Image (spheres, rainbow, N blue to C red):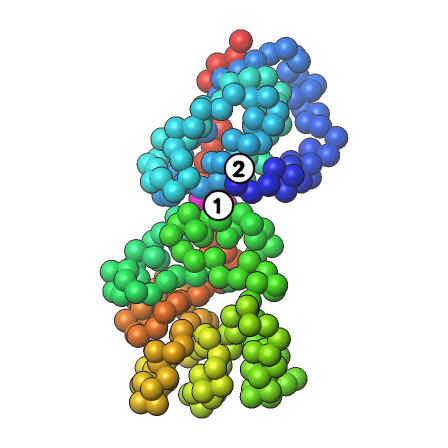
């Protein structure tokens, strides 16, 4: 579960000095029952985080749909009972978290299933193109995808801007000497650089912005030189839900998409008060 203190920052942003509307119009001692409902079909996520926020403010929570479960429009995800002001204070923050995470999980699941039908050996991964990384990475995993790096501290990924400053050979040698515990991945854009990176002992090569036909040529050359089995191949750049299956047909290991976090549509969830007492 995402740390509670991280989640509370969103609520503090939404209500820095309290919920003045609820404080103005709802008596302090009014309690309520409420439900959070799915307004569309998909994969639900963010349930644990919403539950933690409501419980922090003394709300009793009953989970009806767990993270990763398929939901249909109209399904009840959570039942809530407690102080009405507290429920409304947390409402929007909880819905925002669930909406974003469920949107990512739903789209990830769709792409994972698309890829598996073509090639069950290929993983679908996210990228660091996100500012809400703990939530987004967890949502990707709930949807069945791979999170990729959580941060710049997790693994060595030599990209084009690194290679604009240090030659490929020198960059890989330095990276491998830096730590025996860190994976070394190299982003390449040509067949020659892909082969050279493999020869120099990179653990992963990322074939960036290459067409399927270009990737196929790289794979064939790696196989011809006896290098394919010693390296992981990741493809990225220009991959969309419409063309992902073309890439999945290839002898690759990972498809990574920033799309999962920077372009995914929010999932529609709603909170409804069903009784006051």
Residue 100: in magenta span:
yes
Q: Is residue 111 visible?
A: yes
Residue 107: give x, y in percent of width and height. Answer: 39, 52
- Classed neighbour count for the residue bearing mark 2: other residues with Cα under 10 Å, few (<14), some (14–19), many (≥20): many
State which quadrant residue 16 falls in. top right
Residue 263: give x, y in percent of width and height. Answer: 49, 57
For the point 35% across and 90% down, the residue is 225
- Classed neighbour count for the residue bearing mark 1: other residues with Cα under 10 Å, few (<14), some (14–19), many (≥20): many
For the point 67% across and 24% down, the residue is 21
Residue 136: give x, y in percent of width and height. Answer: 51, 51
Residue that lies at the very extreme toward the front in this rendered image: 180
| Residue bounds of the magenta highlight | 97-102
Q: Is residue 98 visible?
A: no
Residue 235, relative to residue 3: is it above or below? below
State which quadrant residue 192 falls in. bottom left
Q: Which element is circle 1 on?
A: helix
Asked if labels 1 and 2 touch by Cβ distance under 8 angstroms, the answer is yes
Q: State how far apart marks 2 and 1 are (Cα).
A: 10 Å
Name the disc covering residue 145, or none.
none
Residue 9, relative to residue 91: is it above or below? below
Which tag is nearer the camera, tag 2 or tag 1? 2
Residue 199, relative to residue 96: is it above or below? below
For the point 52% across and 74% down, the residue is 184
Q: Which residue is mark 2?
A: 49
Question: Foreground: 69 or 273?
Answer: 69
Residue that lies at the very extreme toward the right in this rendered image: 17
Q: Which residue is mark 1?
A: 101
Question: Foreground: 160 or 122?
Answer: 122
Chain-order first, disc 2 or disc 1: 2
Left or right: 163, with 36 as reference point: right
């Amino acid at each position: 579960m995402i740390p509670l203190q991280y989640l509370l920052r969103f609520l503090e942003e939404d209500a820095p000095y309290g919920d003045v509307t609820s404080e103005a119009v709802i008596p302090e001692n009014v309690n309520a029952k409420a439900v959070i409902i799915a307004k569309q079909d998909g994969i639900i996520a963010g349930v644990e985080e919403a539950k933690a926020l409501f419980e922090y403010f003394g709300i009793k929570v009953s989970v009806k749909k767990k993270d990763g479960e398929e939901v249909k429009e109209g399904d009840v995800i959570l039942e809530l009972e407690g102080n009405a002001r507290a429920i409304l204070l947390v409402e929007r923050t909880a819905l925002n978290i669930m909406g974003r995470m469920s949107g990512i999980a739903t789209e990830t699941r769709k792409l994972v299933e698309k890829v598996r039908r073509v090639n069950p050996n290929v993983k679908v991964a996210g990228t660091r193109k996100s500012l809400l990384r703990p939530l987004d990475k967890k949502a990707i995993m709930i949807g069945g995808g791979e999170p990729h790096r959580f941060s710049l501290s997790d693994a060595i990924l030599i990209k084009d801007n690194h290679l604009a400053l240090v030659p490929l050979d020198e960059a890989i040698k330095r990276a491998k000497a830096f730590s025996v515990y860190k994976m070394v991945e190299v982003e390449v854009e040509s067949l020659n650089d892909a082969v050279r990176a493999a020869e120099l002992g990179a653990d992963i090569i990322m074939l960036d912005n290459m067409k399927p036909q270009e990737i196929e040529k790289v794979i064939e050359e790696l196989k011809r030189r006896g290098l394919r089995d010693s390296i992981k191949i990741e493809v990225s750049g220009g991959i969309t839900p419409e063309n992902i299956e073309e890439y999945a047909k290839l002898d690759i290991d990972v498809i990574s998409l920033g799309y999962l976090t920077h372009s995914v549509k929010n999932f529609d969830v709603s909170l409804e008060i069903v009784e006051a007492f």
